[in-house]
Amino acid sequence: MVFFAANSLLARLALRDGEIDGGSFTAVRIAAGAAVLSLLVSLRAEGLSSLRHHGSWGAAAALFGYAITFSLAYLWLEASTGALILFASVQIAMTTAGLLRGERPRATDWAGMALALSGLVYLLSPGLTRPSPAGALLMAVSGFAWGCYSLAARTARSPTIATAGNFVRASSMAAAVLVAVWATGRAHASAAGLELAIVSGGVTSGLGYVIWYVALRDLTATRAAIAQLTVPVIAAAAGVLLLQEPMTWRLVLAGAAILGGVALALSGKRPTI
């Protein structure tokens, strides 16, 4: 979750200040993730040829769909509104998938989710605005795509190679978008914007998603969804420490509710399937 929160901060720094456009940020981010992960795979006994047999085009499409719609949605949405729509969509997508697969969450799971979501709404409420239909739809699609990408971990035999394979496949989609964006003449990228995109892709996305694929082996879809509600709290805390953003009682109280809800959901026995 720390990697995901770092991703949020890097994207905010790059896109909020106009250091790079959303399409270029997404393309560079995915390409950097593919490069770093391919290097790691090349050092393994399986070699780069193993990428053909790990990952899938479906998971790659979900990865790319999440990344591009996430970047584009913030052209219309405020950060707080976007975060609420994103995480609500992830909860709905992954919890519904879990129920359809036969998961039976316990009462503590539902109670923890309700408490954490209430804390999230309270945390983000000062910045909530009426969303534009286009922005809300894009962010909802982003959350749904991320849920699908996370669920694809169930079939991953090797998290590192599977994640690398997904990033490499998604790079071809990102390249097409990059060409289209630059063809319109609206693309722009400063050195700082490119650096932020590279770090986001190569470190907090590439390596972070490998760790996420490993963690998902021991989590049901419902609990994996709930665990991700800690990301806004971690991002907010990092904003206080690194970006000199103010520490408020709202952050303290909302953070306690979110973390308490997640702890409640994860503390019980594994739900029956």
Image (cartoon, rainbow, N blue to C red):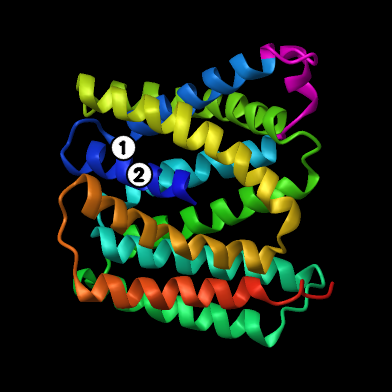
Residue 260 visible, this orientation:
yes
From the top left corner, tell me how far across and down residue 1 is, in percent.
49, 52
Mark 1: amino acid: Gly
Q: Callout 2 environment at 10 Å: few (<14), some (14 to 19), or many (20+)?
A: many
Q: Callout 1 environment at 10 Å: few (<14), some (14 to 19), or many (20+)?
A: many
Residue range of the region highlighted in magenta in the rendering: 42-56
Residue at image coords 30%, 51%: 238
Q: Taking 14 as reference, is 212 left or right?
A: right
Vertically, is 142 above or below 140? Answer: above
| Residues at discs 1 and 2 in contact (Cβ within 8 Å) | yes
Element type where label 1 sits in the image: helix
Query: Residue at label 2?
Result: 71
Residue at image coords 40%, 55%: 138
Residue 199, quarter of picture: top left
Say whether residue 50 is magenta: yes
Residue 189 visible, this orientation:
no
The quarter of the rendered structure image containing the C terminus is bottom right
Residue at image coords 24%, 75%: 250
Vertically, is 220 above or below 209? Answer: below
